[in-house]
Amino acid sequence: MLCSEMIEIERKFLTVSEAYQQAASSKTYIVQGFLNSHPERTVRVRLKDDKGFLTVKGKSSEDGTSRLEWETELPEAEAKSLLALCEAGTIEKYRYEVPYGNHLFEVDVFLGDNLGLVVAEVELSHPSEVFQKPTWLGEEVTGQPQYYNSQLTKKPYRLWSS
């Protein structure tokens, strides 16, 4: 089993076009739910195609860029069993991995109750790291809780007012 523990440092953005799709190196279907979505810690179960993962995330820093993240791989059957125990609300999305400059952007195209929402994330080695921004990157939404997957299960994008 793969296991990692680290401080995750990332920034999130909306997108302004679908140009990332042509530059993507991969596209993965993801289904995920939350065993715990408390703001101090979340416990997520995820299926990425046929691989399962259990992830624990700590509370975000004040600026929303960093938090503790621990993840381990699970057999598909175990992940499916745990998904059945999750809180109400499931996230379904396609994830595009898009290399750009020295970084890899993960672009999530949400489905179901979050259809229409597209969020791009880039992981950094430190909060002030400089990175090249592709032309399809739009408004930054780092640290805005409504864009956290755990919150999208409680108040899906389709319920947001314009």
Image (cartoon, grey):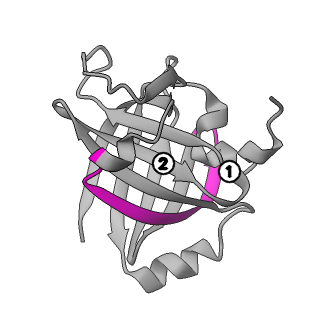
Amino acid type, label 2 = Asp
For the N terminus, the quadrant is bottom left
Looking at the image, residue 40 sits to the left or right of residue 94; the answer is right
Report the span colored magenta. Answer: 23-40
Q: Could you say where residue 62 lies in the image, as x and y percent from the top left?
A: 52, 18
* Residue 64 seen in this snapshot: no
Mark 1 sits on what residue?
114
* SS class, disc 1: helix
- Residue 101's place in the image compared with 27, above or below, is above
Q: What residue sits 60% from the left and 26% below the top?
A: 144
Residue 54, image x and y in percent? 44, 63
Picture coordinates of residue 52, whole percent (x, y)? 41, 72
Q: Is residue 29 magenta?
A: yes
Answer with left or right where residue 147 lies relative to residue 134: right
Residue 46: x and y, percent?
48, 65
Per the picture, the main secondary structure of the magenta-coloured stretch is: strand
Q: Toward the viewer: 64 or 98? A: 98
Tell me if 83 is positioned left or right of 7 in this view.
Answer: right
Q: Which residue is mark 2?
A: 108
- SS for tag 2? strand
**Residue at the extreme bottom:** 77
Residue 147's label in the rendered image is: none
10 Å crowding of disc 1: few (<14), some (14-19), many (20+) = many
Q: Residue at 53% of width from left, 80% of height from top?
A: 80
